[in-house]
Every structure is written in structure tokens, then in C-alpha cells.
Image (cartoon, rainbow, N blue to C red):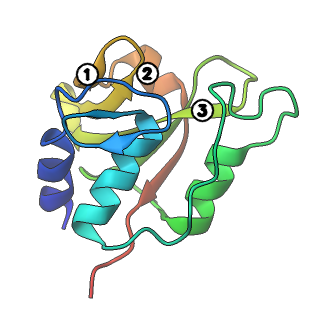
Amino acid sequence: MSVAIVQAARGWIGTPYVHQASVRGAGMDCLGLVRGVWREIVGAEPEPMPAYTPDWGEAGGAELLLGGAGRLLHPAPDEQPGDVLVFRMRAGAIAKHLGILAQTGAQASFVHAYDRHGVVESPLSAPWRARIAGRFRFPPVN
């Protein structure tokens, strides 16, 4: 399944960044990418997505993104292509960015939707790796 997840994620590369969107070719944010890959690989989304602001609950300090990933995805005990990576954009901040691990090893990379860049595949460099707050897997498909 991990190969299918990576292929699906790479299929969204070039989609522009649009906050709260999840439409291939039209627009998406980082959560929209994971939602879109979920729909392609797993099926219907498991719950409706409430509206959210770009600050992701920073004012209240709630770990909304990390909590949602933990509720809907499976913890990943090791690193495999297709894993959903949850990032903190700075130390001590709440987690508010997602990506899908595309490649491991010396050339590790991940696919993510990034403001002003759209969906891209980026190297999982040491600075990105240091920001990982959680690693999860999509549920198995029956």
C-alpha cells in the first residue's frame, strides 16, 4: 500500500496552495493533501472537516492536528514511504503542518502543500526532520 500512497501523493504535485481546499489541480493545503490521498486510497473521509483557521488553534494551544492524526491514523513505529508526517514549525509550538513521506534513506523526501509553493516534494532535510512531532500510517484497505 505504501507505493500506492506515494504515487497518489505525487499525483497532486503542482496543485496550488488554497487554505482549507482539497481538490487536485485546483487547490489544497497540507491537510487537504492528506484528505485527498485518503479518498484515493482508503475511500470516503471518516468524518466531516470543520472550518479551521491558518493558526490551527495557536491561541488556545490545542494540538488539533496531532490529535486528529492520532484519532484517525495508526502510529508508525518505524519510517516507511507513505507515512503521514506531522510537523511543528518551531520548537514549543503546536503541530500545524503535514506531509507524506515519499522516500527514505539518504535521499529522503516528503510531499506536502506549502503556502506560496503549492504541492511539492521536498528533501526531508535535518531541519525538517527535527520538526517531526508524529509519524502515522493510513489504515489498511480491505
Residue topped by disc 3: 96
Asked if disc 3 and disc 1 are in contact, CB closer than 8 Å, the reply is no
Quarter of the rendering containing residue 118: top left
Instruction: Name the residue rendered at 20%, 60% in the picture.
Output: 2
- Measure the C-alpha gap from mark 2 to mark 3: 13 Å
Relative vertical location of residue 40 with respect to residue 93 in this rendering, above or below: below
- Measure the C-alpha gap from mark 1 to mark 2: 9 Å
- Secondary structure at numbered mark 1: strand
Q: Amino acid at mark 3?
A: Lys
Image quarter hosting the N terminus: bottom left
Asked if disc 1 and disc 2 are in contact, CB closer than 8 Å, the reply is yes
- Secondary structure at numbered mark 3: strand
**Label 2 crowd bin: few (<14), some (14–19), many (20+), radius 10 Å:** some
Instruction: Name the residue rendered at 24%, 67% in the picture.
Output: 41
| Residue 1 horizontal side relative to residue 113, left or right | left
Closest to the camera, between mark 2 and mark 3, is 3
Q: Amino acid at mark 2?
A: Trp
- Disc sitting over residue 128 in the figure: 2
Q: Which comes sooner in the sequence, label 1 or label 2?
A: 1
Residue topped by disc 1: 122
Q: Which comes sooner in the sequence, label 2 or label 3?
A: 3
Instruction: Name the residue rendered at 42%, 33% in the picture.
Output: 29
Relative vertical location of residue 69 with respect to residue 54 in this rendering, above or below: below
Instruction: Name the residue rendered at 44%, 26% in the picture.
Output: 129
| Residue 22 horizontal side relative to residue 57, left or right | left
Quarter of the rendering containing residue 104: top left
Image quarter hosting the C terminus: bottom left
Q: Amino acid at mark 1?
A: Ser
